Amino acid sequence: MKSYDVVEHGKPLQMVERPLPKPAGSEVLLRVLAAGVCHSDLHIWEGYYDLGGGHKLNLADRGMKLPLTMGHENVGEVVALGPDAAGVEVGERRLVFPWIGCGHCAVCQRDEEQLCLAPRSLGVFSPGGYSDHLLVPHPRYLLPIDNLQPAQTAPYACSGLTTYSALKKVGDVMQREPIVIIGAGGLGHQCISILRAMGGKGAIVVDIDSRKREAAMLAGALAVVDPKAPDAVKQIQAAAGGGVWAAIDLVGASMTARLGVDCLIKGGKLVVVGLFGGDITLPLPLIPMRAMTVQGSYVGSLGELKELMELVRGNKLAPIPITTRPLEQANQALTDLRAGQLIGRAVLTPQA
C-alpha cells in the first residue's frame, strides 16, 4: 500500500509503503478512487492553527501524531470486509464520512460525532485518503454514490457537508433574504450550489481574488464584492437591500470575520466556518444592542451528509470546478492551494 504522509510538519509529504491492511471486525477496506485536497489539510501539514496575537494551537497538543496520511474527502471501491461488516458489498463505490468519534459518548449517540471529544477523524487522527487504500472502521460511514463521478463526489464529505451544515444554521432567513458568503474557493462554490438547492434567495460573494469573484458570478452569485475596497461594507449592504441578515465566513481570518460582523443588520447572524486564523475584538455592549449572533460551525454530522447526498442524487446541485491530480502530485496540489491558484477543488486520483 502506497501513501503520501506528513512525516514532519511544514516539510514535503513523503511517499511511504506499508503492507495492505486486512480488515478485522466491522472494518471495510477501500481502494481509493478520489481524495479531495482541503484547505484544512494545509493547517494539518503546517501543524498548527493561528489563534491571533502571536498565539498558536499546536495540533500535537490535540492528539495528532506523525506520520499521518491526510485526506478526509474520499470516495473508494470496497475491496475487502471484516467478518462483522454488513450492509456493503465488494465492488461497490462509496463516499466516506470521515468525522468519526468514539462511538460511545452522548455526543456520538445523538449523531454528532463531529463534536466528539475523542475524535478518530480520517485524515486527521486516523489514516486518510492520500493513499491507494483506506481502512474505514464501520460500514455505517459509507454512503452510496450510485452513478456519480468519484472526483466530483469526494468533496461532499467536507466542503459540501461543511457548507450544508452552516446553511442549516442560518435557517429559513435564507429563503427570504440574500445571504453573504465570504470566500469563493472550494467551500464558496459548494455553498452557492447548495444554497440554490435548498431554495435560497441567493448570495452576495466576497473574495479578494478577481478570478474567484468572476467564477462566483458564473456559478450564480447575485453580486460580488472585493473586501479590500474602502466601501466594501456599504457595497455588501446595498446588494443585500439595506442590511445583511446572515453571513457565512468560509475564510475565518481577522479581516473577514470583522467584515461579516460589520455588515450585519440588527438581529443578524454570522456563522464562522473557516480556519485561516487570527482574532477579533468585539465591544460587548454591541452584541446585545445589535441582537447579533456569532456562531461557529464545524463540518457536519453523518445525518447531514445523508441529507446532502439526497440533494446530490436528486440532481439539484450544480457541480463545482474540479481539477484532478495523480496521487504523486499531492505536494504540488497543496502548494497550489496555499498559493491560492486553485479554482474550486483539487482532487487526487490514486487509481488513475
Image (tube, grey):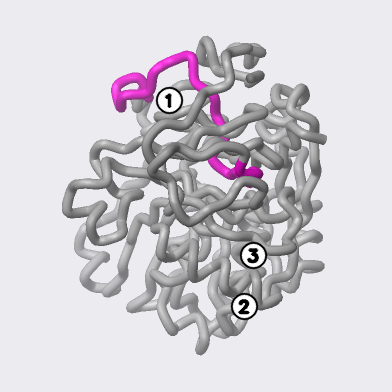
The image position of residue 92, as x and y in percent, is 64, 52
Task: Mark 3 vs mark 2: give the one in front.
Answer: 2
Marks 1 and 3 sit apart, C-alpha to C-alpha, by 28 Å
84 drawn magenta: no
Please, what secondary structure does the residue beneath circle 3 have? strand
61 drawn magenta: yes
The image position of residue 271, as x and y in percent, is 41, 61
Q: Which residue is mark 2?
A: 197
Q: Which residue is mark 1?
A: 48
Are the residues flagged by discs 1 and 3 in contact, CB closer than 8 Å?
no
> Within 10 Å of the Cα at label 1, are there few (<14), some (14-19), or many (20+) other Cα atoms?
many
In terms of depth relative to the viewer, which is nearer, 60 or 74?
A: 74
User: Would residue 62 be found to the left or right of residue 129 on screen?
Assistant: left
In terms of depth relative to the viewer, which is nearer, 177 or 244?
A: 177
**Residue drawn at x 35%, y 49% as measured from the top left:** 114
On screen, 221 above or below 250?
Answer: below
User: Would residue 111 be found to the left or right of residue 242 on screen?
Assistant: left
* Mark 3 or mark 2: whose residue is earlier in sequence: 2
Please, what secondary structure does the residue beneath circle 2 have? helix
* Quadrant for the N terminus in the image: top right
User: Disc 1 marks which amino acid?
Assistant: Tyr
Q: Which residue is mark 3?
A: 205
The image position of residue 264, as x and y in percent, is 43, 71
> Within 10 Å of the Cα at label 2, are there few (<14), some (14-19), or many (20+) other Cα atoms?
some
In terms of depth relative to the viewer, which is nearer, 284 or 97?
A: 97
State which region is magenta.
Answer: 58-78
